[in-house]
Image: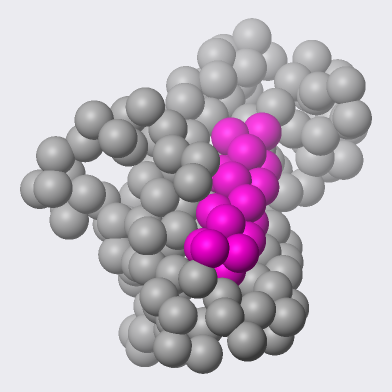
Amino acid sequence: MRLSESYQKATPEELEKYTNGCGAANAKFDFIPDTMWFLSIHAACKAHDWEYRKGRIKATKTLLSCEGKAKGFGMMRFCKNGDCEECVKTYGNDHLDEKKNCNHLSEKRKADDDFYFNLKYIINLKGGFLKYFRRIRAFWYYLGVKKKGTTAFWDEGK
């Protein structure tokens, strides 16, 4: 699995405090299972939670630095919502990467890509005769965090 050095060095207490498994920590109901047809993917979800927390800290520092240069505080509102176009209109191209995406969300993209890699790793290792169906479900989990995970990335919850 792809696990960051900070995740590997984290104590069990830190992992317990900052990770919760699959699904948003602040959700009223835990309707995202930590299994795919009886195969546990909890380890991939915990690593993803950790990377979101670590990435949010780094992204916030970068964002505050950009806002300081822009002499305004609206950028965080735009970028937290993934609205880079509006951000560019207001603040210019300084914070975009080579693909014209907000640099502030590059940590999120890396965490999401690693999550998908880790899901496929678990499935390839232990997927059994349901491997094909589990891969499809893994792709849907990945799309979910990629498209709808921005709020969870910026959330200060668990």
Locate residue 141, reporting x and y percent. 63, 71
In the rendered image, the vertical position of residue 47 relative to residue 135, given as above or below: above
In the displayed structure, does residue 148 sit left or right of residue 122?
A: right
Q: In which quarter of the image is residue 116?
A: bottom right
Would you say 78 lies left or right of 85 here?
A: left
Whether residue 103 appears in this view of the structure is yes
Compared with 145, 2 (above or below) is above
Query: Looking at the image, is 46 positioned above or below residue 89?
Result: below
Which residues lie in the magenta part? Answer: 106-125
As for residue 145 lying within the magenta part, the answer is: no
**Residue extending farthest top:** 69
Q: Can residue 149 be seen in this view?
A: no
Q: Residue at x 32, y 37 (%)?
A: 7
Q: Residue at x 43, y 61 (%)?
A: 45
Nearer the observer, 34 or 29 = 34
Residue 108, image quadrant: top right
